[in-house]
Amino acid sequence: MFGLIGHSTSFEDARKKAQELGYEHIAEGDLDVWCSAPPQLVEHVEVKSPTGKSIEGAYIDSCFVPEMLGRFKTARRKVLNAMELAQKKDINITALGGFTSIIFENFNLLQHQHVRNTTLDWERFTTGNTHTAWVICRQLEINAPLIGVDIKKARVAVVGATGDIGSAVCRWLSTRTGVAELLLVARQQKPLIELQKELKGGRIMPLEEALPEADVVVWVASMPKTMEIKVDTLKSPCLMIDGGYPKNLDSKLDGSGVHVLKGGIVQFCKDIGWNMMQLAEMDKPQREMFACFAEAMLLEFEECHTNFSWGRNNITLEKMDFIGKASVKHGFSTLNLQLQAALA
Amino acid sequence: MQTLESPSISNFAPPVSTAEGLPDFSTESYKDAYSRINAIVIEGEQEAHDNYMSLGTLIPDKADELKKLARMEMKHMRGFTACGKNLGVEADMLFAKKFFASLHGNFQKAYEASNLTTCFLIQAILIEAFAISAYHVYIQVADPFARKITEGVVQDEYLHLNYGQQWLKANLATCKDELIRANKENLPLIRSMLEEVAKDALALHMDKEELMEEFMIAYQDSLTEIGLDNREIARMALAALV
């Protein structure tokens, strides 16, 4: 069995969803009630690969909402309790979705392996970042030509280049895709210099200088709501792949030559009979999902029960190859620009 | 999906200094709060003993098993009494008796009416789940002596919770309505007991929010084990909010 740990995009959505599912006790509660609400296994689902293989999975809502980000202990508890529930339900491999993997990493939850009388078995969990990175790279390779960007001549800015996903994307793009130049953007200089050494290339730049030079921008860092991007300084055409969480590029950019694509999203080849992806505001919630969630499914299909994506900067090209191959084999495709809408 | 470089959550990291460290066990404010919390635990274990003995009189063929559980509770009571002595604290037993009065009254009423389901729900599920959750939270912030004792106790309490669960599970077909009624009457008491003790618990570095969540997890797990489905549990949990 595979598992997905997720959460609602806002407190308001969470209450609505809880009401629909018949969890009145928390639907009617205020934020304090949600802070002490246990995680819930809300849905079981069966997924059948085009290979004929069927797997079962479960969706666990951590009862975390982004409004809890300021409450350090609460956020930590939500993630650990959801992981404990996944393990108690004997789920082989569970992906940490949305903010939960960010909380896990930033709050260093590796120090908290003991939850009540359970010792968390890290092998049962994955951040799903390898698949996310592979999907973002494929989205770039497929969609840049669609809007008239020649990949071999393209300058690609990776914003958040030194993160787990960002560094994997840089590795792939420089080795496999062969883009003309990588523009490396991140907050801290030291890891940027190390990344540049590893890649044997790439130009370290501040964001505002990188954007006007880029034919493609890969965002794997979410932007603060206050950040302004001057559309008229961007190249035309320009492909923006929004691989951050939460996704908020769309609302900031509506320039004519700028094409925004939700990054790290895959589509399954047929409808999955589940309700929970509506929480993640997918356009086609019956098929679309975060690539990190799909990674848990792929690992279950491949019976690869291990923490495939774990820690930071452990994503190798070989791992991306493995997960990419599995992704195609089991019926996933990347979310792409809708050409007509894109060229309108 | 991970975006570790996210500037929007750049301040989103654990505070350098949190209230997570161990409290100073020697301060007067700690000892004052401990005198009530310790008393609650001692009284709780004493009442648990008495309740299991009472249950034994209602199901004579289980009397020996229930006596065993009761004896364990007495052992716990002695352990927690030692915890108070170790810190030089005198437990405020008068406070603790009042603290348990409503729940105790409900158990007695059910016992006199031979309502086994209600008795089991109150003692073996609600009180045990409450104890387990509080002990788990306490273990993280207890003094070394109390920590060791509490770690031993919590394992026993799981056995007791399990005993109640198994009985209710086996009798679910006939006891469900009574179970739901008893929940409605008694779960709000647990919540108000938690509220009543929240300030003292905080002095021991135990958050009300965490205590409530731990309790809900233990309670929910227990109802699941008994055989109730998610919606039934959700409806039952609603009673905690009223």
Image (cartoon, coloured by chain):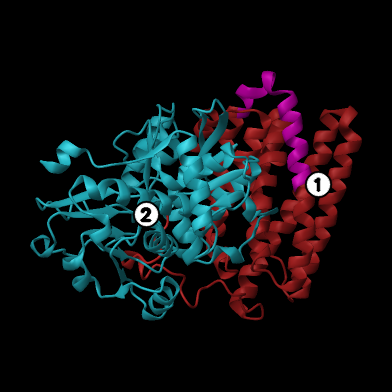
User: Which disc is residue A66 wearing?
Assistant: 2
Q: Position of residue A247 (x, y in %)?
A: 29, 52
* Mark 1 surroundings: few (<14), some (14-19) or many (≥20) residues within 10 A: many
Badge 1 marks a residue whose secondary structure is: helix
Quadrant showing the C terminus of chain B = top left
Whether residue B240 can be seen here: no
Q: Label 1 sits on what residue type?
A: His
Q: Position of residue B127 (x, y in %)?
A: 67, 45
Same chain for the residues under marks 2 and 1 in the image: no
Residue at image mark 1: B49
Badge 2 marks a residue whose secondary structure is: helix
Chain for mark 2? A
- Left or right: residue A302 versus residue A50 is right
The residue lying toward the viewer, choosing from A146 and B154, is A146
Which residues make up the magenta segment? B158-179
- Left or right: residue A156 versus residue A310 is left
The residue lying toward the viewer, choosing from B175 and A265, is A265
The residue drawn where x is 67% and y is 23% is B175
* Mark 2 surroundings: few (<14), some (14-19) or many (≥20) residues within 10 A: some
Q: Position of residue A322 (x, y in %)?
A: 53, 48
Q: Label 2 sits on what residue type?
A: Pro
The residue lying toward the viewer, choosing from A15 and A250, is A250
Chain for mark 1? B
Q: Indicate yes or no whether the magenta region holds residue B220.
A: no
